[in-house]
Image (cartoon, grey):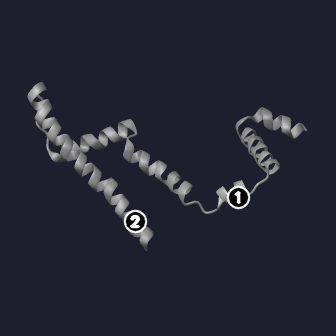
Amino acid sequence: MKKIIKTIATLFVFVVAVPSIAGLAITELWNSILVAVCGFAAIGFWQSVGLFLLGQILTGGFILGLFLVGGSIHKIFHHDGDWHSHWHNMTQEQRREFIERRRREYFRFRNHKTADSDAAE
């Protein structure tokens, strides 16, 4: 239940609160600077929220980045297995073997020539 409440609160902050605060800031800055200096028309709150969201979409801004990276960061800090202690309990030989196996798997996936040469062996 705590996880659901935490998820809803996080979504509220990033979907409602951040765009609202940014919208207020953009409205004030736009209307106080650009109207006086450049002669642009004054904008309202919803137009400034729209500008903020458009900027986020066009630049791959922090909101999208937090949603995409947030899952990865959560997985790092709240992982299912205990890899940290597992890695430290390995011997040097086991670590080398693990690294070599990962390299072979990675290059087999990434480089078909390596996969062909491994198959020939």
Percent from the top left, x then y, of residue 58? Answer: 36, 36
Q: Nearer the viewer, mark 1 or mark 2?
A: 1
Q: Is 114 drawn above or below residue 45 in the view shown?
A: above
Question: Which residue is at the front of the view, 42 or 80?
Answer: 80
Sequence-earlier tag: 1 or 2 = 2
Furthest toward the top, the residue is: 38
The residue at the point 80 percent across, 38 percent down is: 115
Rendered residue at 76%/54% (across/down)? 90
Where does label 1 land, which residue? 86
Near-viewer residue (101 or 55): 101
Q: Quadrant of the C terminus?
A: top right
Counting every numbered tag in the picture gives 2
Q: Quadrant of the N terminus?
A: bottom left
* Neighbour tally class for label 2: few under 14, some 14-19, many 20 plus, Cα within 10 Å: few
Q: Which mark is residue 6?
A: 2
Q: Vertical placement of 14 versus 29: above or below?
A: below
Where residue 104 sits, quadrant-wise, is top right
Q: Amino acid at mark 1?
A: His
Element at label 1:
helix
From this view, report whether residue 1 is shown above or below residue 89. below
The front one of 41 and 85 is 85
Q: Amino acid at mark 2?
A: Lys
